[in-house]
Image (cartoon, grey):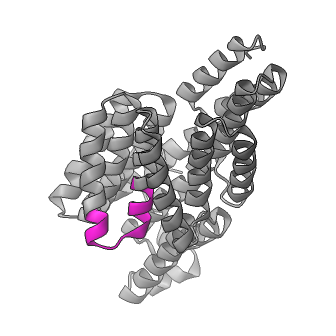
Amino acid sequence: MVHRGHPAELPPADKRDPLAKLGESRDVRLLITTIRRRGNEHLHRGETAAAAALYEQSLAIAWAVGYVAGIAHALNCKASVVHRRGDHEEAEQLYNDAAIFAEQAKEQRLIGMVQQNLGILASVRGDWDAALASYRLSLAAFDAEHDAVAASWVLNNMGKLHGDRGETALAEQCFSRAAGIARERQDLLVESVVEQNRAELLLMQRQLDEATAACTRAFALAHERGDRLRIAETLKLRAKLERERGEYDQALATLEDARRATTATEDALLAAELLCEIGEVWRRRGERVRAGAMWTEALAAFERVGAGSAATDARQKLRSVGGASV
């Protein structure tokens, strides 16, 4: 792994895999790209283990032939897996390694992707100013490349961030632009994620009927794609809506469905969020001991993945029911 801030160096050709003798042929580059994109397909369906294996294969071949752009892309993808599994420190290192190689390869679009991912990490830590700065750098890079698809992802993340900060109007602007791009290009993945985040924003505004409609749309799109991760996230949102309507038994059943869907995705942060949501339902039902047990488990999970803001929230919840705050 490259140390942050130092120039990236390839090992000498004679120290690499025998594939190095093939040189940087177009066919090998295409193979590297194809393997990585197949990994992306798995990752976007929540099939993390399958994606990780393909990313490692793409990275190994890229190293073997000295394909710098391929190394940069594969490191970024590998970081996404590590990020999902909850090791944010290693993920940040891998993203920074990817950025070094991307700069060497003059891969402007990839630089934008890495900045977006660093923004997501900062957002999870609760460092919203740093997250917004990274998102703006990312959006500028994608706009310079006229890459509307990539820009739609950043706009979605910016919208979620503005929503978390209570900046409703800015959030709605970002979601509207992202959704427009997604519909124009028939991008079901982006449209599903945007609808999900819009539903979260509507829920925060207590517009339950509108939030339910957006949630139903997001779930249908995720189901159409066979996207386990988005299905689990949308079930979590559905449970929140059920909870707000006082349908506690149904909310608990929905959250258990979400936990089963999450298992294959290996998303450590989502798994912790589901524990927190289960605790909140138990609290609403007056089951303080059960709520405290769930929040204790959620707090430990949030701390493991470095989710500072979520950990603080879980700690406050524990105090509210008289639980120990570790």
Q: Which of 319 and 68 lies nearest the eye of the viewer? A: 319
Q: Which of 295 and 150 lies nearest the eye of the viewer? A: 295
- How many labels were placed on the picture? 0
Name the residue at 48% across, 67% down: 221
Left or right: 312 in relation to 276:
left
Please indicate, yes or no, whether residue 200 appears anywhere in the rendered image: yes
> For the C terminus, which image quadrant?
top right
Name the residue at 75% across, 56% down: 260
Please indicate, yes or no, whether residue 23 appears anywhere in the rendered image: no
Magenta stretch bounds: 181-194
Q: Which of 234 and 229 lies nearest the eye of the viewer? A: 234
Left or right: 55 in relation to 4:
right
Name the residue at 41% across, 72% down: 67
Residue 257 placed where, x, y %? 72, 54
Up-down: is 78 above or below 92? below
Name the residue at 24% across, 63% down: 148
Q: Which of 82 and 67 lies nearest the eye of the viewer? A: 82
User: Does 50 appear in magenta?
Assistant: no
Left or right: 174 in relation to 276:
left
User: Does 189 appear in magenta?
Assistant: yes
Residue 256 placed where, x, y %? 75, 49
Up-down: is 298 above or below 323? below
Task: Find residue 48 and report its image quarter.
Answer: bottom right
* Prevalent SS, magenta region: helix
Up-down: is 229 above or below 242? below
Q: Residue furthest bottom?
A: 27
